[in-house]
Protein backbone atom coordinates (compact mmCIF):
# COMPACT_ATOMS: atom_id res chain seq x y z
CA UNK A 1 0.00 0.00 0.00
CA UNK A 2 1.37 3.38 -0.94
CA UNK A 3 1.84 6.24 1.52
CA UNK A 4 -0.78 8.24 -0.32
CA UNK A 5 -3.32 5.45 -0.03
CA UNK A 6 -2.47 4.96 3.68
CA UNK A 7 -3.07 8.61 4.45
CA UNK A 8 -6.31 8.62 2.53
CA UNK A 9 -7.49 5.62 4.56
CA UNK A 10 -6.46 6.78 8.04
CA UNK A 11 -7.28 10.47 7.78
CA UNK A 12 -11.06 10.00 8.35
CA UNK A 13 -10.26 7.75 11.31
CA UNK A 14 -8.00 10.34 12.96
CA UNK A 15 -10.56 13.07 12.42
CA UNK A 16 -13.23 10.92 13.99
CA UNK A 17 -11.13 10.23 17.11
CA UNK A 18 -10.27 13.90 17.58
CA UNK A 19 -13.88 14.90 17.10
CA UNK A 20 -14.97 12.32 19.66
CA UNK A 21 -12.47 13.67 22.19
CA UNK A 22 -13.65 17.22 21.65
CA UNK A 23 -17.28 16.22 22.15
CA UNK A 24 -16.38 14.43 25.40
CA UNK A 25 -14.55 17.47 26.72
CA UNK A 26 -17.45 19.73 25.87
CA UNK A 27 -19.94 17.42 27.57
CA UNK A 28 -17.85 16.91 30.68
CA UNK A 29 -16.93 20.54 31.26
CA UNK A 30 -20.41 21.73 32.36
CA UNK A 31 -20.67 18.76 34.73
CA UNK A 32 -17.37 19.64 36.41
CA UNK A 33 -18.30 23.30 36.57
CA UNK A 34 -21.67 22.45 38.06
CA UNK A 35 -20.03 20.25 40.67
CA UNK A 36 -17.67 23.05 41.64
CA UNK A 37 -20.55 25.52 41.79
CA UNK A 38 -22.57 23.18 43.95
CA UNK A 39 -19.63 22.70 46.26
CA UNK A 40 -19.05 26.45 46.52
CA UNK A 41 -22.74 27.06 47.13
CA UNK A 42 -22.80 24.44 49.88
CA UNK A 43 -19.76 25.97 51.54
CA UNK A 44 -21.25 29.43 51.25
CA UNK A 45 -24.55 28.23 52.72
CA UNK A 46 -22.73 26.59 55.60
CA UNK A 47 -20.75 29.72 56.27
CA UNK A 48 -23.86 31.85 56.04
CA UNK A 49 -25.71 29.55 58.39
CA UNK A 50 -22.84 29.65 60.86
CA UNK A 51 -22.66 33.39 60.54
CA UNK A 52 -26.39 33.74 61.09
CA UNK A 53 -26.23 31.56 64.17
CA UNK A 54 -23.35 33.59 65.54
CA UNK A 55 -25.16 36.83 64.87
CA UNK A 56 -28.32 35.57 66.53
CA UNK A 57 -26.30 34.42 69.51
CA UNK A 58 -24.53 37.75 69.72
CA UNK A 59 -27.82 39.62 69.58
CA UNK A 60 -29.71 37.30 71.90
CA UNK A 61 -31.26 39.21 74.80
CA UNK A 62 -30.04 38.69 78.34
CA UNK A 63 -31.97 36.31 80.53
CA UNK A 64 -34.58 37.94 82.82
CA UNK A 65 -32.48 37.39 85.94
CA UNK A 66 -29.43 39.03 84.33
CA UNK A 67 -31.63 41.94 83.21
CA UNK A 68 -32.82 42.34 86.79
CA UNK A 69 -29.27 42.25 88.12
CA UNK A 70 -27.96 44.78 85.59
CA UNK A 71 -30.77 47.23 86.42
CA UNK A 72 -28.89 48.87 89.28
CA UNK A 73 -30.69 51.52 91.33
CA UNK A 74 -29.11 54.94 91.70
CA UNK A 75 -26.80 55.49 94.66
CA UNK A 76 -29.41 57.68 96.31
CA UNK A 77 -31.96 54.88 95.97
CA UNK A 78 -29.52 52.36 97.43
CA UNK A 79 -29.25 54.49 100.56
CA UNK A 80 -33.01 55.05 100.67
CA UNK A 81 -33.61 51.31 100.52
CA UNK A 82 -31.06 50.68 103.28
CA UNK A 83 -32.52 53.45 105.43
CA UNK A 84 -35.94 51.75 105.28
CA UNK A 85 -34.64 48.91 107.48
CA UNK A 86 -33.03 51.36 109.91
CA UNK A 87 -36.36 53.18 110.25
CA UNK A 88 -38.16 49.86 110.81
CA UNK A 89 -35.53 48.61 113.33
CA UNK A 90 -35.19 45.33 111.47
CA UNK A 91 -33.47 42.87 113.80
CA UNK A 92 -30.69 40.53 112.72
CA UNK A 93 -31.88 36.98 112.04
CA UNK A 94 -30.21 34.86 109.37
CA UNK A 95 -33.12 32.41 109.41
CA UNK A 96 -35.87 34.95 108.74
CA UNK A 97 -36.83 37.40 106.01
CA UNK A 98 -38.26 40.88 106.20
CA UNK A 99 -40.69 42.30 103.67
CA UNK A 100 -41.43 45.93 102.88
CA UNK A 101 -42.23 47.91 99.74
CA UNK A 102 -38.71 47.21 98.43
CA UNK A 103 -39.09 43.43 98.52
CA UNK A 104 -38.35 40.43 100.72
CA UNK A 105 -34.80 39.80 101.92
CA UNK A 106 -32.99 37.75 104.54
CA UNK A 107 -32.35 39.62 107.79
CA UNK A 108 -28.56 39.44 107.83
CA UNK A 109 -25.68 41.53 106.47
CA UNK A 110 -25.67 40.15 102.91
CA UNK A 111 -29.46 40.13 102.73
CA UNK A 112 -29.33 43.80 103.75
CA UNK A 113 -26.89 44.63 100.94
CA UNK A 114 -29.05 42.61 98.52
CA UNK A 115 -31.95 44.87 99.49
CA UNK A 116 -29.90 48.03 98.96
CA UNK A 117 -28.56 46.79 95.62
CA UNK A 118 -32.02 45.64 94.48
CA UNK A 119 -30.91 42.10 93.73
CA UNK A 120 -33.51 39.49 92.71
CA UNK A 121 -32.89 37.48 95.90
CA UNK A 122 -30.77 37.43 99.05
CA UNK A 123 -27.15 36.83 98.07
CA UNK A 124 -24.42 35.76 100.49
CA UNK A 125 -20.93 37.07 101.22
CA UNK A 126 -19.66 34.30 98.95
CA UNK A 127 -21.93 35.09 96.01
CA UNK A 128 -21.93 38.90 96.11
CA UNK A 129 -18.56 39.01 94.26
CA UNK A 130 -20.31 37.25 91.35
CA UNK A 131 -22.18 40.46 90.54
CA UNK A 132 -19.61 42.98 91.80
CA UNK A 133 -15.99 43.95 91.18
CA UNK A 134 -13.15 45.16 93.36
CA UNK A 135 -12.26 48.83 93.48
CA UNK A 136 -9.48 50.79 95.20
CA UNK A 137 -10.18 52.71 98.39
CA UNK A 138 -9.79 55.99 96.50
CA UNK A 139 -12.84 55.18 94.38
CA UNK A 140 -15.23 54.30 97.21
CA UNK A 141 -18.59 56.01 96.80
CA UNK A 142 -22.00 55.84 98.42
CA UNK A 143 -23.58 52.47 97.68
CA UNK A 144 -20.33 50.53 97.42
CA UNK A 145 -19.51 47.88 100.04
CA UNK A 146 -16.69 46.67 102.26
CA UNK A 147 -16.73 42.89 102.01
CA UNK A 148 -15.10 40.10 103.97
CA UNK A 149 -16.00 36.91 102.11
CA UNK A 150 -16.77 33.82 104.14
CA UNK A 151 -14.28 30.97 104.11
CA UNK A 152 -14.21 27.41 105.40
CA UNK A 153 -12.93 28.72 108.75
CA UNK A 154 -14.60 32.11 109.14
CA UNK A 155 -18.01 33.59 108.48
CA UNK A 156 -18.19 36.55 106.14
CA UNK A 157 -19.55 40.03 106.67
CA UNK A 158 -20.40 43.02 104.49
CA UNK A 159 -21.37 46.65 105.11
CA UNK A 160 -22.75 49.33 102.78
CA UNK A 161 -20.53 52.39 102.44
CA UNK A 162 -22.22 55.78 102.82
CA UNK A 163 -19.56 58.48 103.09
CA UNK A 164 -16.24 59.35 104.70
CA UNK A 165 -16.42 60.97 108.11
CA UNK A 166 -13.53 63.31 107.28
CA UNK A 167 -10.67 63.88 104.84
CA UNK A 168 -8.34 61.47 106.63
CA UNK A 169 -10.37 58.47 105.40
CA UNK A 170 -9.76 56.66 108.67
CA UNK A 171 -13.48 56.22 109.39
CA UNK A 172 -16.72 56.25 107.43
CA UNK A 173 -20.49 56.12 107.80
CA UNK A 174 -22.01 52.79 106.85
CA UNK A 175 -25.26 50.87 106.80
CA UNK A 176 -24.89 47.57 108.58
CA UNK A 177 -27.05 44.70 109.78
CA UNK A 178 -25.52 43.48 113.03
CA UNK A 179 -26.45 40.79 115.58
CA UNK A 180 -26.24 43.36 118.37
CA UNK A 181 -28.11 46.32 116.95
CA UNK A 182 -29.97 45.13 113.86
CA UNK A 183 -30.03 47.54 110.92
CA UNK A 184 -27.99 50.62 111.85
CA UNK A 185 -26.39 53.65 110.25
CA UNK A 186 -23.20 54.45 112.13
CA UNK A 187 -19.49 55.27 111.92
CA UNK A 188 -16.91 52.51 111.44
CA UNK A 189 -13.10 52.54 111.36
CA UNK A 190 -11.73 51.89 107.89
CA UNK A 191 -11.86 49.25 106.63
CA UNK A 192 -13.54 47.63 109.66
CA UNK A 193 -12.95 46.77 113.29
CA UNK A 194 -9.51 45.27 113.89
CA UNK A 195 -9.41 41.50 114.15
CA UNK A 196 -12.65 40.89 112.24
CA UNK A 197 -11.18 39.81 108.91
CA UNK A 198 -9.89 41.42 105.74
CA UNK A 199 -12.33 43.85 104.14
CA UNK A 200 -12.11 44.76 100.46
CA UNK A 201 -14.04 47.53 98.64
CA UNK A 202 -16.46 46.23 95.98
CA UNK A 203 -18.80 47.97 93.57
CA UNK A 204 -21.98 46.49 92.15
CA UNK A 205 -21.65 45.77 88.44
CA UNK A 206 -23.34 48.28 86.11
CA UNK A 207 -23.40 50.95 88.79
Image: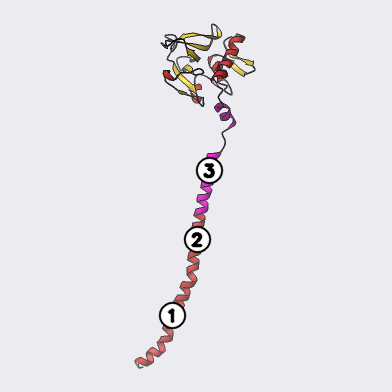
Give the CA separation, mark 1 to mark 3.
56 Å
In the image shown, does 107 or 69 lie closer to the viewer? Answer: 69
Q: Nearer the viewer, mark 1 or mark 2?
A: 2
In the image shown, does 109 or 133 lie closer to the viewer? Answer: 133
Q: Which residue is mark 3?
A: 55
Q: Position of residue 7 (x, y in %)?
A: 38, 89
- Magenta-drawn stretch, dominant element (helix, strand or loop): helix
Look at 41% across and 86% down and name the residue there: 11
Q: Nearer the viewer, mark 2 or mark 3?
A: 3
Instruction: Give yes or no for residue 55 being in the magenta stretch.
Output: yes
Quarter where residue 137 is shown: top left
Give the CA separation, mark 1 to mark 2.
31 Å
How are the residues colored?
secondary structure
| Image quadrant containing the N terminus | bottom left
Residue 147's place in the image compared with 14, above or below, is: above
Give the CA separation, mark 2 to mark 3.
26 Å
Residue 187: in sight, yes or no? yes
Whichever of labels 1 and 3 marks the residue nearer the N terminus, that label is: 1
Element class at badge 3: helix
Q: Position of residue 129 (x, y in %)?
A: 48, 23
Element class at badge 1: helix
Mark 1 in CB contact with mark 2 (< 8 angstroms): no
Q: Which residue is mark 2?
A: 37
Q: Residues within 10 Å of mark 1 (few under 14, many from 20)?
A: few
Look at 46% across and 72% down and name the residue there: 25
Q: Position of residue 58 (x, y in %)?
A: 52, 39
Q: Which residue is mark 1?
A: 17
Q: Residues within 10 Å of mark 3 (few under 14, many from 20)?
A: few
Mark 1 in CB contact with mark 3 (< 8 angstroms): no
Mark 2 in CB contact with mark 3 (< 8 angstroms): no
Element class at badge 2: helix
Magenta span of residues: 44-73
Amino acid sequence: MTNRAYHQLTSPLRVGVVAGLLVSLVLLSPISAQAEDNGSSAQADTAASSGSASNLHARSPRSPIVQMITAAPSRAKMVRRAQSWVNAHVAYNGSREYTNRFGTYRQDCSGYVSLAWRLPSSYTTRTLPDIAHRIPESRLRRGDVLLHSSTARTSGHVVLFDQWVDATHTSYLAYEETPDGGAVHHALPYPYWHGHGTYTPYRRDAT
